[in-house]
Amino acid sequence: MKAVLAILAIAAPAYADVHGTIVDRASRKPVAGAIVTIGGELAASDDDGTFAIAAAPGRYVVQVTAPWLVTWRGPIVVGRAGLELAIEVEPSAQIGGEIVDVIDTAPSAPGQTKVDARLARALPGGGDAAKVVQSMPAVARPQAGSAEVVVWGAAPQDTRTFVDGVPVPALYHVGGYRSAVGNDLISDIRLTPAAFGVDRGRAIGGVIDIALADPASGPTLRAQADLLDVSLAGKTELGGTTIAAALRQSWLDRAIGLVSDPATLAPNAPLPRWSDAQLVARHAYDDRLVLTAWAIGSLDGLDRRLASDDPATRTTEHVDRRMMRAQITLRRDRDDGYDSVQLWAGRDSSLDDYQFGLVPADLQQHAWVAGARGVQQTRIANRATLTLGTDLDGELATLQRAGSLSVPAREGDLHIFGLPPGDDVAADRWGATTIDAAAHAMADVAVGRAIVTLGLRVDGWMLAASKIFPRVGTAPTIGEQAMAITEDPRASVQVRITDTAVARIDAGRYHQARAASDTSAVFGTPTLGLEAAWHVTAGGQWHAPHAPFAIEVAGYARTLEDLVARDPAVSPKYAKVLTQDGSGDVVGIQLTARAIGYRGLSGWLSYNRSRSRRKDAPDQFSRYFDHDQTHGLIAVAGWEHGPWTVGGRVRFATGEPRTGVVGTFFDTRTGRYDPIRGAHNGERLPAYFAADLRGERRFVSGGTRGALYVELQNLTNRANAEEIIYNADFTQKGYLTSLPILAIVGVRIER
Amino acid sequence: MRFAVLLLLAGCEAALDQRLAIVTEPRILAITAEPAEAKPGAMVTFGALVASPNGTLAVPPHWAFCIAGKPPTEDNAVAPACLADGGDAIAPLATQLAITAMLPADGCEKFGPDVPSTGFRPRDPDPTGGYYQPIRADVGDVRAFGLSRITCKLPTAPADVAHDYLTNYAPNISPSLDVLQLEVAGTRMPEDAVPAGADVTLVAGWPVAAAETYLYYNQDTQRLDTRRESLRVSWFATAGSIEVDSSGVDEASTATSVSTTWHAPTTPGTVWMWLVIRDSRGGLATQTIELAVR
């Protein structure tokens, strides 16, 4: 440790000081709390608008951001003598000031959270920007090892993730340790937990938008390594086109392999392998016409094995996931708006191969996906904007499934953790096509102190399945295509009550197509259609002009209709194992206080109270949603001071519902006890509490910048319950607990 | 690095007893059916092996057929309704040590692929292609279910495949066990002279014919495959400890025995041991051994 400190001490004098003052362009008053970014450094302006950043000599793009400001960028050259800057900024129409222009700065919806990637990396999460989603106010506490995101009581598959508007199948790699869309090239992350606008569709939960950064904003070369993985990123310029690339490869399983066989050491702790890569190119033809193209991909693998002398209890698992997306976007800015057109395509593959004793459960899915998106936004009057768009999205999937009907488990299954699946087995191969062509229009009108947004999204759906009945011998199979048109109105009204207080209400109708994996004539229902929801959110925000604090309250309600659910009947109808008789409702309230760059401190404190319930059939009693968390409290903060960055997270959450065991009987065919289950989701896991801390010390040596970081997860070493487990005859009950205190140490080097 | 890695993994496993090999209270270890597979409506003789710390109990169970089907995605062996003490889901039989009863004639409809009328989904078989009629045995507060394999037709197979299956499928026959062998340090031990505290190797063998070959309808290829049963032996004792609960051979193995280690108790006395052999088609047989630890 002494040696490390000595190195840091020697390296520190290589900084050059960049001082500056930020003032409001109109009033000339100093702007406090704005976040200033220079290369790898970050600072917040003080009350007098001044800031200071220690940076290595070189060329940079300075960026000044704050939620109430129009983002300011400018190039600088830092010499060894340092630099003095004077920056003029102007407030955005979003918060503060007279609302005169709503183009491209639509006010944020209640509960919406947008986090700059730099802040996100400073928070506990292994330095991975998109991991911040799991710490956002509207997101339920994720289970250890889970890659799922539960937003305001919505099922994980109901929330959609977009990268620059392109949908991706998963935000995280298998195991949830890292984001599947990379880290180094991310600019910011925005979560809209409900009532999102007309430009997004095919989701009845929330929307996660990942924006990739301008490739010019990154370092020339960056390398990072810690216990989990190693990554490399860099950029170059080719004939006026800036190109950035990033690559990441895990080595966690290999690190574990140094001391034991990861496949057998901890069969309940996933030790996945992952890698991802991103390539981004940007070419500015002029100040107003920009072409952006990128390709991203991810690979995931997981192998687990539970060895046994008894073939009936041997368990193996093999998971292989692959994702690739490529897109090209041309955007032209006009004085009165902008035009944008985007084409994208991709390929998804997944293989989940389980063997529980003698019972197999295999699911393979391969899909070609493609789409196009066009947006035109125009100011049609001094205080009115019209946005028109088209959104085409298609998926051609081929699937193969064999084995148990109850794996993969569905939300609402009466499953007791750790028990083998049912041993009724079947097999099927089929195809499914999902095409959605949508047109949407949205008008923003500022009337007095109010902004009214009215939108309509019209989707034309084509849902097809290759077989409506199981295949029998060589008899020709019969497929089906169904067409549907949905008209989803969405609207919001925002009223500036005072100079510091804003109230807003949003509402809308939402639809999403059934999953291709549910359209099997054997395991599902080929004729499944659309799931639907109504969202309503209402809230208010208090934010003093130019103050780096905001307080927000958001109430939300969601009704869910036509949800795909299992048919509880003893004898389901032929080729109709799944129904659309499911329904649900979610209601809750969220209180959030945010600090934005106050003396280098950014973060939020949020409390969420929620109730999310479901029914799989009309005649059933309503039950708690599998991931319902009544209370959620989270405090997240990142603090920048000179070469130091410290991030912390404290979280409390109600335990998720589980179905208890009230008795047992012995099955002499299998030789094991079966549980007699209590009320469906009638009990809960114990409450969760964890505190995490992350510290980073940056240094400069010659022309090289770097950082050493340490992250301590679960500081209190609390054994949080992740699942209820039982002994063999269900007479004893215990908990599968999460990881104890864990340290992750890493280093980052960049030029 | 090693410390960090171990930290990563610690805490994931909780210690709850997952063992069933030592009998500390009365338990029904097995329900045998003879024949092991029969058509609905056939006569089948059922017997129960009731173990206790004092040896096998000759207590007659209350027998009843479970006649309620379960939803396809119910993971338990039987429908919840069959756990009730009364009601329409249970067809009581009698209270006696072994019972010969006629399998319900609608077994292939309730528990197999036959559907009450067109428009309903046939039930799926188990991984060996089998369907089972549940039978319940109650001894005091102890409740167990046996599942008797029933022969049903293939539901969605092409006609020629279904015909071949009907013609050539051989119903399951219960496996059998050879006499248990006990060895200490490679030397065979008599059952009446087991050294106290010794590590005793238990060797359970079976005739070659116990692992039968059978026709299996492959739902993916829609053809008939010939497969071989896997076999597993569950070990039970009233004292000492046994290395594993069960040992077995999978379909690819032609081995005719399995073994494990029994750590004999350090105090002399009588120890009861039971072996239950199961084939993957639901057939089973038992063996009871009285051991004298000296």
Image (cartoon, coloured by chain):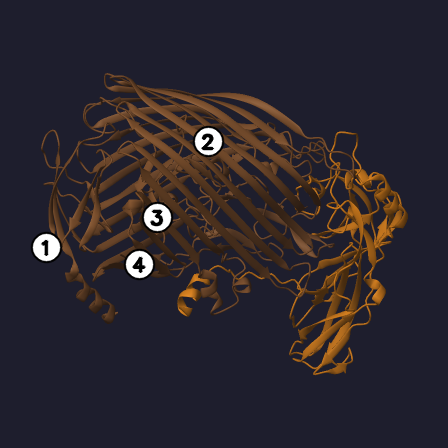
Chain colours: A brown, B orange
Residue A696 drawn above or below residue A657: below
Question: Which sits earlier in the primary sequence, circle 4 or circle 3?
Answer: 3
Q: Amino acid at mark 2?
A: Ala
| Crowd around label 1: few <14 · some 14–19 · many ≥20 (10 Å) | few
Disc 4 element: strand
Image mark 2: chain: A
Q: CA distance from mark 1 to mark 3?
A: 30 Å
Disc on res. A372: 2
Q: Which residue is mark 4?
A: A748
Question: Which sits earlier in the primary sequence, circle 1 or circle 4?
Answer: 1
Question: From the viewer's perspective, is B183 left or right of A713?
Answer: right
Q: CA distance from mark 4 to mark 3?
A: 17 Å
Question: From the viewer's perspective, is A26 left or right of B108?
Answer: left
Q: CA distance from mark 2 to mark 1?
A: 50 Å
| Crowd around label 2: few <14 · some 14–19 · many ≥20 (10 Å) | many
Q: Which residue is mark 1?
A: A81
Question: Which sits earlier in the primary sequence, circle 1 or circle 3?
Answer: 1
Q: Which residue is mark 3?
A: A244
Say if mark 2 contacts mark 3, CB within 8 Å. no
* Residue B294 x, y percent position in the rendering: 71, 81
Residue B260 drawn above or below residue A651: below
